[in-house]
Image (cartoon, coloured by chain):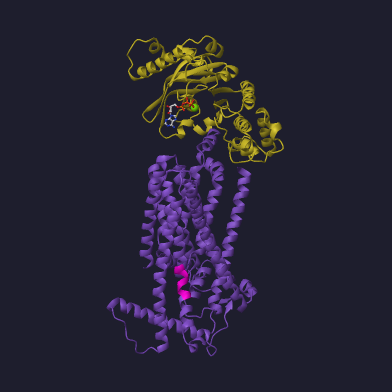
Chain colours: A purple, B yellow
Amino acid sequence: MNVTSLLLVLVSIALLGYFGGYRKARALSSSAKTHSRPQYHGYLVALWALLPALAVLMAWTMSQEAIITRLVMSELPATAQHQSAAERSLFINQFKNLAQAKKSAVDESGVSLPNEEDDPLTNQAANRYLHWQERSQVARTLAVITLAALAIWLTLRRLRASFQARNRVEKIIQFIMMLSASIAILTTVGIVFSVLFEALQFFRHVPITEFLFGTHWNPQTAIRADQVGGSGSFGAIPLFTGTLLISLIALSVAVPLGLFSAIYLAEYASPRVRAIAKPVMEMLAGIPTVVYGFFAALTVAPLIRQTAESLGLSASSESTLAAGLVMGIMIIPFVSSLSDDVISAVPQILRDGSYAMGATKSETIKQVIIPAALPGIVGGVLLAASRAIGETMIVVMAAGLAANLTANPLDSVTTVTTQIVTLLTGDQEFDSPKTLAAFALGLGLFVVTLGLNIISLYVVRKYREQYE
Amino acid sequence: MTLDKTALVVDNNNNSTEVNLTGSASDTADMLDMTIGETVGKALLEDAKLNVRHANVFYGDKQAIHDISLDIGKNEVLAMIGPSGCGKSTFLRCLNRMNDTIPICRVEGSFLLDGEDIYDRRQDPVLLRSRVGMVFQKPNPFPKSIYDNVAYGVRLHGLAKNRAELDEIVEKSLRRAGLFNEVKDDLHKPGTGLSGGQQQRLCIARTIAIDPEVILMDEPTSALDPIATALIEELITELSEKYTIAIVTHSMQQAARVSNRTAYFHMGKLVEVNDTDSVFTTPQHPLTENYITGRFG
Ligand SMILES: Nc1ncnc2c1ncn2[C@@H]1O[C@H](COP(=O)(O)OP(=O)(O)OP(=O)(O)O)[C@@H](O)[C@H]1O
Ligand SMILES: [Mg+2]
């Protein structure tokens, strides 16, 4: 049975378990007062039927591939055993492909393929592989269903009038919540560690000082020894300054526009205007970044170039300014939406207090409302900043790929994320410095955003201490 | 409580009669009907600070104030009492145009401050509010330091020429509000960190810092403990030497302690207004009597 139908079966078993538990509890309650209502007995039986069986199913499915491969390899004659690691993995790939082909052929025509070109060893391995796979599936189905049935039986046996099913269901639910939370946390930790590990690999090839303080970025390395090509230089400074420059431009667009529109929506706009304008503005964040990208490259960049030239300045056709401006428009909703929410949440009584002191509306906004809403506003700005730092597509299309170390917004620059993409999309061995550099950049980016978050948390807390 | 059954019945009767009355004007010639339209007592004064004539206030279609005429004298403390929802806050907020901030609210009638029409087109509500200050039911210090809270209005209206003068005004206002000794070492700590009673005195300090002519107080002690309440009541008595004060309160003892005159509101109407002593000792209107003897509201 495949996983989907097995899951369906499990759910039906759990349903049966629910009704079993429910009916038994009803029967119990006719003679004595039960601790928990019958539903809870039902839930408990169903949960016990489902959870262990699901755990086994998951573990089995995840580990069966590796175990079967091992089994197949150990069954083969000794000649097949003594291969180099590379040959071994090639061989494993071959027999798996063959097995796949056989399986689909059986599925389609109902007859087994005669195999001509394959060498007997591969063929033998493929057959064994299919054999074990079939076995494994049958065993898995049996194990899972038995486990579910056993769990139902055991739980049903324990049901008494005094049985605290409700409290136990509570415990199980708590456990499920905790499990979900830890999966999210563990995934994050896992990602960070894998990036860290690969980055350390990179620093074996390239000294960390060159990466951190080098001002030249040119990741092209020779793929083969006889090829003409540089040894590559991996100074990340131009990338980080490029990211910084573009993000700063974007934020200097988004923060004032976003904040002012939030203030307008929250304080001045009539409910009708607000009801229309707010969702429309939030739509800005829903436009795909590719669309922003070509808007920046085809409309804004030429415009900036013309304007610059008419002013006697030289501008490259791909400019930081174009990318930054368009990115700024894109992240307006991050600032405005959150700010609008916190501004609206400032208690009316504070406003009244200020008006009653003879303050005008804008004085009230500046002196009372913005300070009261500041933690939320800072939160919105940070969200926008991390979005700007992480944005890739607009930069690829509008700001170019040249790693220039410049503060001139009319030049082209590149950013960390853009370089990560270009590093990983080429045909390169996975352990070449070029590919590994992507992980080092990723790590750098992670550290920067983490730092940003910590600083902002600190600022907000400091501010709160002062004012709350 | 020692309310007996008959009292409750009377109470109910009064209530339902009242509802009927506002529904149809010329129903039964009940005694209550005759008198509720006309305010009894002493509503008009000579040489008053504030004159209100024929005030009607509407929230959308709903009328919250029905034809109220009332004067508030110079250096007088006027207490406004009445059951919940009878329009005390609404009336108070008309006096400094705070109702302007509620879009659906509409005010009719004439409101004069020293003979000037408060609702005149040329009247600037912002300036008006610096002459008619307000203290709210819930203490609402700004998210600023104690010093900046008191300096807020002074800075807005440019009442201090330099820092030394500002310091002086802040200290004087805090002293008058009876708060200075408690906070003199923490002037730059947040005002929101004070206790409720201290916060309310801070709000009073910030109101008197801009030296208004009238101070409106909407249940200023309802969120405070008895000691803080006593402090504020003392303060009101002191302030009345300099300012005209209108205070809404649910505590009849408080009204009796701090006010010169007391106004009794009922369902958007001003039922009775008179010297505080006579309102509490010899109320003229049966509704007032019911209310102050605890049979109502
Ligand atoms: N912002 C508003 N919008 C609509 N109706 C309102 C508003 N404020 C008050 N009202 C209505 O006006 C009437 C008078 O309210 P008001 O707040 O003046 O009563 P109050 O005497 O101050 O009562 P309380 O003693 O409970 O404070 C009430 O019926 C109330 O429902
Ligand atoms: Mg009120």
Quarter for ligand 1? top left
* Magenta stretch bounds: A60-67
Q: Is residue B85 above or below residue A24?
A: above
Q: Is residue A289 above or below residue A125?
A: above
- Quarter of the image for residue A27 reads top left
Q: Residue at x 54, y 26 (%)?
A: B219
Q: Residue at x 39, y 60 (%)?
A: A10
Q: Is residue A435 left or right of residue B147?
A: left
Residue A69 coordinates in the image, percent (x, y) = 46, 78
Residue B217 coordinates in the image, percent (x, y) = 55, 26
**Residue B189 or residue B103, whichever sits in front:** B189
User: Can I make out residue B103 in this image?
Assistant: yes
Q: Residue at x 54, y 73 (%)?
A: A438
**Magenta span has B51?**
no
**Residue A85 or residue A265, whichever sits in front:** A85
Give the quarter of the figure containing the C terminus of chain A: top right
User: Can I make out residue B37 in this image?
Assistant: no
Residue A209 coordinates in the image, percent (x, y) = 65, 73
